Image: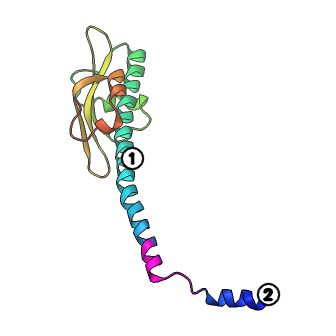
Amino acid sequence: MKKYLQQKLNNEKGMTLIELLAVIVIIAIIAAIAIPAIGSIIENSRNGAVKADFQQALASANLYVTETGTVPPASSTNHLTDLAPYIEDKGSLKEVIITRDAASKELKITGKAELNNGTKYEIKTAISNSGLGKIENKNFTGVDIK
């Protein structure tokens, strides 16, 4: 019995070249499917981070209004300096303008942001926090948000 098992073990040579190529092809197919999917997940995460930065600025503006009783001055070209005591980390934000809707009294934001990789975001039309929340991360792209 021992001799029979040794013969069987000695006859095993490992994988053939064809088997090895088949494994490589399967791995390549899996990689071709996975890499684009991971890329879109990363892009959605970046978009979501910028959206969260704008929402954080709006939350800081709400604190500002609560404490001071007014919105940041309209004469200011960038309200990030006015909101500095209320915002812990400005993240990707470069410029923020806060306005108050006359009818609804809701705070709205316009502004610019830029990621470390150079992607630029711009909100051209004033949007509220609830409006930002309705935009899916995949649609919150670097071109401009309206």
Q: Is residue 95 left or right of residue 31?
A: left
- Where does the image place residue 71, in percent across and percent down from the top left? 31, 18
Secondary structure mostly seen in magenta is helix
Earlier along the polypeptide chain: callout 2 or callout 1?
Answer: 2
- Count every numbered label the image shows and give the total: 2
Inspect this view and state whether residue 23 appears: yes
Q: Quadrant of residue 131?
A: top left
The label on residue 1 is: 2
50 to 28, vertically: above or below: above
Which residue is under mark 1? Answer: 41
Do residues under tags 2 and 1 come within 8 Å of each other at their CB atoms? no
The label on residue 139 is: none
Q: Is residue 21 magenta?
A: yes
- On-image quarter of the N terminus: bottom right
- Where does the image place residue 73, in percent across and percent down from the top left? 26, 21
Q: Is residue 76 left or right of residue 80?
A: left
Look at the image and give the residue range highlighted in magenta: 13-22
